[in-house]
Image (spheres, rainbow, N blue to C red):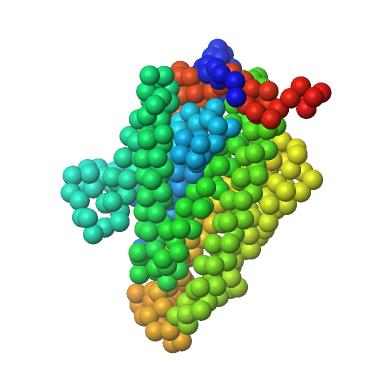
Amino acid sequence: MKQVDYREIEGGLPFYMLVGAIGVFVLAALGAAYYMEHNGHWVTGMSNQVIWGTPHVFAVFLIVAASGALNVASISSVFGKTAYKPLARLSGLLAITLLVGGLAVLVLDLGRPDRLIVAMTYYNFKSIFAWNIMLYTGFMAVVGVYLWMMMERKMNTFTRAAGMTAFIWRLTLTTGTGSIFGFLVARQAFDAAIMAPMFIIMSFSFGLAIFILVLMALYKWADRPLGDAIVFRLKNLLGVFVAAVLYFVIAYHLTNLYGTENHGVERFILLDGGIYTQLFWIVQIGIGSLLPLALLYGPGGKSRLWISIACLLTIIGGLAQIYIIIIGGQAYPMEMFPGKEVSSSFFDGVVASYTPSLPEFVLGFGGVAIALAATVVGTRVLRFLPVSLADDQVDPHHSATDAA
């Protein structure tokens, strides 16, 4: 591999117009957060039964994807795959910005953001939520140091050690995020040990899909060469991760079906859940899993347009999956006595209703906008992107005959 030359992207009017367009969504999200806080969360679709709404879906998705976005850098530093080395800096930047976007949505959706101070000053180490606060903030610090090791030439000798630390930390972080649901026994759809490893592989899929889209968009916008070798290598890896997510989803539901106490919630998700069943079969499985696999490994896998569509469909399927886990898991009532019907004045035995409101969607997309804005600004002020990712620059097997 030839020496890689990193440069900032160009500024000027197009750059400020792009940042301004993204900034509109950020301002709209702040307005939505103010509207919900000023009027109370009764203006949303949330209730005493569904206390985590659509903003939490976006927040968890972005946090999970942040861990997966670092996967490209980990493959380079930890596993010694030099073909991924030119992408490592952008991988680290995107990991931080996605996490910042996700955490911003969480903070703005608290209803009482000032109570975050309590979570920062008083720790209950029996709570997985308390552990995750340290994991999230620590992740940004670890990845920041990792980027420093990569970008400062005299510190390059420590890159592998920093990369290994970041790799272990991000696995722990995603395990903690999945364990939020895996440890909750008060929801029938949660309380499963497979949640932690499933969230890890979900992070690989969602994060890489976002990384590929951002990579191709930045190089297209900056008018820099991006060879097929890198793109096809990444899309093949994405296909493996999408298939792995599908495998874990099948394993999760088959495991639940084995226990009688879970037959009700499985029937709810797979057959009788209305919107949740439709999201599962049509969006998560069909649009978000099977169709991307067909596009990535079929004849369209050589087209960047179809690769981009496959990445977008993977993201849509991922959002649907998180929505089903979080919202569907809360909507289904706790199975107090398996095989028996339970009813009371406290909504026992009643499927909770939830309809997302516009402010919730605006706040969620605002988190995405924050991540994108930070990524674009980061590539403008610091040298995250190689000047060229053409095949003759990054592919050791490339030859002039191949180019011809």
* Residue placed most toward the observer, 57 or 305: 305
Expressed as whole percent of the image width and height from the top left, the position of residue 379 reads 50, 23
Viewer-proximal residue, 178 or 73? 73
Q: Residue furthest top?
A: 12
* Residue 10 on image: x %, y %: 56, 14
Residue 98 seen by the camera = no
Q: Looking at the image, which residue sits at the far left?
A: 122
Q: Is residue 99 left or right of residue 293?
A: left
For residue 271, above or below residue 290: below
Residue visible at 26% across and 44% down? 116
Point 39% across, 68% down: residue: 191
Residue at (76, 49) in percent of width and height: 298
Q: Position of residue 107 (x, y in %)?
A: 34, 43
Question: Against 324, is 233 above or below?
Answer: above
Q: Is residue 233 visible?
A: yes
Find residue 37 and report its image quarter: top left
Quadrant in which residue 251 is drawn: bottom right
